[in-house]
Amino acid sequence: MARIALAQLPTLRKTASYLLLHMMVAILVAYAVTGNLMVSLTLSLIEPAVQAVAFFFHEKAWERRADRGAAPPVPA
């Protein structure tokens, strides 16, 4: 399992960076709408976490797609 995680380390790092950025934006937007810091923190924690998981799988799908396109053609 650790080997799998190590192989995915670049994507996991990118996902973590995206999660932090997304959470900061979500907190600021929620605060601008509600004017309440506690409400904005509560609203902003779950959605970015779910988005980060979705982003990880989205990134892996794009990598697989790029890998398929880069494969040399099979001789007939």
Image: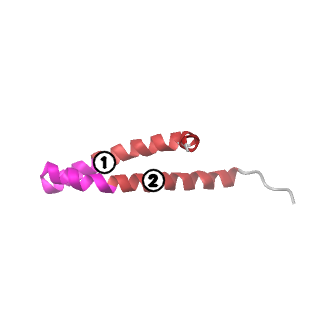
- Quadrant holding the N terminus: top right
Identify the main secondary structure in magenta.
helix
Q: Position of residue 46 (x, y in %)?
A: 30, 55
**Distance of label 1 from label 2 (alpha carbons):** 14 Å
> What residue lies at 44% left-to-right and 46% top-to-bottom?
15
- Give the mark nearer the N terminus: 1 vs 2: 1
Colour convention: secondary structure
Q: Is residue 36 magenta?
A: yes
- Quadrant holding the C terminus: bottom right
Q: Residues within 10 Å of mark 1 (few under 14, many from 20)?
A: many
Q: Position of residue 18 (x, y in %)?
A: 40, 45
SS class, disc 2: helix
Q: What amino acid does circle 1 point to?
A: Met
Disc sitting over residue 23 in the figure? 1
The outermost residue toward the bottom is: 76
**Side (left or right) of 9 relative to 38:** right
**Side (left or right) of 64 relative to 16:** right
> What residue lies at 18% left-to-right and 51% top-to-bottom?
31
Disc sitting over residue 55 in the figure? 2
Q: What amino acid does circle 2 point to?
A: Phe
> What residue lies at 54% left-to-right and 41% top-to-bottom?
2
The outermost residue toward the front is: 1
SS class, disc 1: helix
Q: Position of residue 42 (x, y in %)?
A: 22, 53
Give the vertical position of 6 relative to 50 (above or below): above
Cβ atoms at labels 1 and 2 below 8 Å apart: no
> What residue lies at 12% left-to-right and 52% top-to-bottom?
35
Disc sitting over residue 41 in the figure? none
Magenta residues span 25-47
